[in-house]
Image (cartoon, helix red, strand yellow):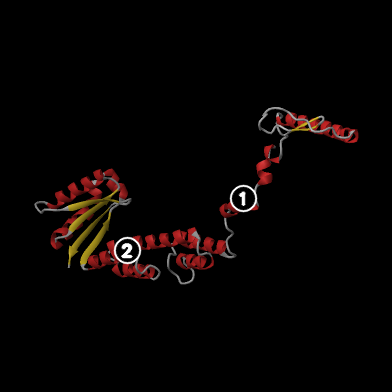
Amino acid sequence: MRLSLYGIESLRGGQHAGIQRPLPARPRLRACILLPLLLAMTACANKGEEAAGQPAAPGIEDRPGAASLNASPAESSVAPAARQADAPQPQPEGVAALLEQARWALDAGRLTHPPRYNAREYYQQVLQLHPTSREAREGLQIVLDRSIELSLEAAHQGNFKRAELLLTRAGRFALNDPGIRGAREYVHRMSRQGRRTFPLPAEAVRARDADALAPQLKQIVRHAVEDGATIEILTADDLQALWLFDQLRQHAGKEALHATIHDAQEPEVRLTWRR
């Protein structure tokens, strides 16, 4: 069916398909009312077709910054939350002062002694207030490493009592540390051996002054031969160590000597023998 200026035309198929059958004439009053209505409907249809061919006016989504305006509350809160997570967390009150005291004690060599005023206890107090303190954890590891180093130095000098004391103090907060266990075993083995250290004047070694070193080198050879000791030569470089060993062999005469070479800032010779 379609509208016409005069009424409704029927296009129903049938025996005479395609033949338009106008309806009986309506009174003139109805035609007068219907005509303006049809004209208005036609004008609206034409405007709709013109509007369909034009691009739509930009909405909020098409304007700059629309993404931030349309973002959901959950999305808009992501950035502030990330900034808060990246920001450094404030330290509890008193932590900064304890860390300063711990650094001072570490520099002064107060690793685990005297009680209450040593680096180890200061760092432990920091961890009680601020368990995630990275500086405190690293500081405790430094205390442990230095304690082991000092213990081995004492053992090399034959001071086994001090070596054991240093390991005992360090082991109070690191009982299962493999470094402590290894150092204890090493000190125990050395304590069953005789050991003696002979510091040498660095100037004479650098100048290769054989006459100045002769008295000490003769004493070293005598102890090495009598006790069947193993010789350790510690110098700043290998050439100095080889020269020292050559001097020792000259003083030993026909006696065979065996030595090992180690790096050290100050020159010295160590003798080790079994008791």
Q: Residue furthest top?
A: 19
Residue beneath the point at 38% across and 70% down: 169
> Mark 1 belongs to which amino acid?
Glu
Whether residue 61 is situated above or below residue 94 in the rendered picture: above
Residue beneath the point at 37% across and 60% down: 145
How many marks are shown on the rendered structure? 2
Whether residue 13 is situated above or below residue 224 in the rendered picture: above
* Secondary element at tag 1: helix
* Secondary element at tag 2: helix
Q: Which residue is mark 1?
A: 75
Q: Position of residue 110 (x, y in %)?
A: 44, 65
Locate the N terminus by quadrant.
top right
Q: Nearer the viewer, residue 164 or 75?
A: 75
> Mark 2 belongs to which amino acid?
Pro
Q: Residues within 10 Å of mark 2 (few under 14, many from 20)?
A: few
Q: Give left or right: position of 218 versus 49.
A: left
Q: Give left or right: position of 26 versus 149.
A: right
Q: Give left or right: position of 161 versus 84.
A: left
Q: Nearer the viewer, residue 54 or 100?
A: 54
Q: Position of residue 72 (x, y in %)?
A: 65, 50
Q: Nearer the viewer, residue 204 or 163?
A: 163
Q: Mark number for residue 178?
A: 2
Q: Position of residue 68 (x, y in %)?
A: 66, 44
Q: Residues within 10 Å of mark 1 (few under 14, many from 20)?
A: few
Confirm or deny contact between disc 2 and disc 1 (CB under 8 A).
Answer: no
Q: Quadrant of residue 219?
A: bottom left
Q: Quadrant of residue 167?
A: bottom left
